[in-house]
Amino acid sequence: MADISRRARELGTENAFVVLAEVNALIRQGKDVISFCIGQPDFHTPENIQDAAVKAIREGKHGYTPSAGIVELREAVARDMTRTRGIEVRPEDVVVGAGAKPFIGYTILSVTDYGAGDEVIYPNPGFPIYESQIKANGAVGVPIYLREARDFSFDPQELADKITARTRLLILNSPQNPTGGIIAAADMQAIAEILRKHEQVWVFADEIYGRLVYDGQFVSLASLPGMQERTIISDGASKTWAMTGWRLGFAANHKLAPYFTNWVTNTESCASQISQWAGVEALNGPQDAAKKMRDIFFERRNLIVKLLNLVPGVTCRIPGGAFYVWPNVTEACRMIGARDSEELRARLLNEAGVAVLADIHFGPRVPNEGQHIRFSYAASTEAIEKGVARMADFIRRNTVHAKASAA
Ligand code: PLP
């Protein structure tokens, strides 16, 4: 029989989608489940953006566009990145894609060679697509560990220790999925300082949550002296304007833009023209709706952190951005006799009707950091109050006094 390649068989995935299928199956069976699984805003796309898309359809903007995107959008992105990062980004440096996600693969494909031993340093826990794309494209993944004691950023010294002559790419993600952590300005400076000693290292700066910062200031590595040239700034419409299904992302780097354009030609040809016109309005139009969504996320963050810290066996740091919290549940696992966070997650889903993701969905568990789960608070205030109350009640009801322990 015709065979399937090892690469395809071993390709990783986003486990959020796997858990989501489990959740939906339970809901179809009539189970009452409150879900904190999915990493997308629970709002509609702002109306002015919807109107721009309808206008594009009515005006007959139905065809392919240049692979790099329509000029109007590339100009809008360049203007926005110039303003928000304090550097000069030119329209010809910008490439538009069907979401920010494809640029992860395009970057790895553009700066590493298959099977050559090229190393890519990436955050762990982290967005699972980093690791799966590194593997699928024949590079060597080198995880760098995010530490709770550092509010879920890594120690720059660990970066210095992990860079070798084979390192080709460093992936940064701030604000971060899954922890909500942000890389502090001082750490960003330290990272730049280390990179100055290693000219061969590119940086993929995943800044998709860059407008969802609640404490401190958003800092792009590209803004620091000497860093823009080697940094791929990755951003998109999904999270800021609640446009996940529109599939619209942007990457900017002067040297790589022609290569990214060619990858787009080789894959999707171009992002949807309709979405691109909507993106022009998202970037150039009024920002009231985006600001309102951000303010609501900020309020929810404060609420969920406060409530989680009242749950027996749970401690939750205050994450600086995105819409995720990453509570430590080591003690809660011990209290209910769960082996680990994954068993806690499964029991929360099946016995309490609360859907979350476990740390293992974001890479191998970090040594000596205990057990964590991820809540996405892209959920209503009522869902947050009810869901966390269910979790607290579940842990109280199931606390065992036998000697069970979690790693
Ligand atoms: N990068 C991170 C860290 C994400 O969390 C996500 C989406 O969840 C993406 C990239 C991809 O976003 P997009 O919808 O633009 O492809």
Image (tube, helix red, strand yellow):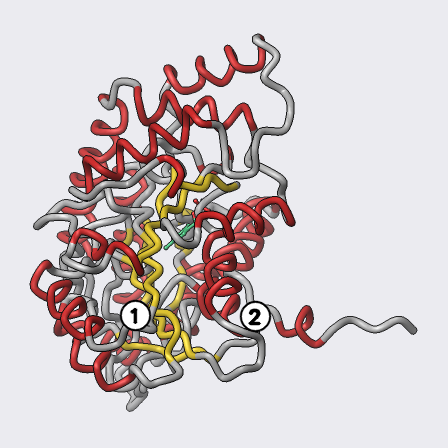
- Whole-percent x, y for residue 42 in the image: 38, 35
Placement of 361 over or under 217, stated as above or below: below
Q: Nearer the viewer, mark 2 or mark 1?
A: 2
The residue at the far right in this view is: 1
Q: Quadrant of the C terminus?
A: bottom left
| Image position of 394 (left or right of 56) | left
In the foreground, 236 or 231: 231
- Whole-percent x, y for residue 239 in the image: 35, 40
- Amino acid tagged 2: Asn
Disc ID at residue 351: none
Q: Residues within 10 Å of mark 2 (few under 14, many from 20)?
A: some
In the foreground, 166 or 215: 166
Name the residue beneath numbered marker 1: 372
- Whole-percent x, y for residue 303 in the image: 16, 45
Residue located 23% across and 43% down the image: 212
Dot 2 and dot 1 residues touching (CB under 8 Å): no
Name the residue beneath numbered marker 2: 137
Residue located 38% across and 33% down the image: 242
Q: Secondary structure at mark 1?
A: loop
| Image position of 229 (left or right of 136) | left
The quarter holding residue 194 reads bottom left
Q: Secondary structure at mark 2?
A: loop
For the question of whether residue 310 can be seen, the reply is no
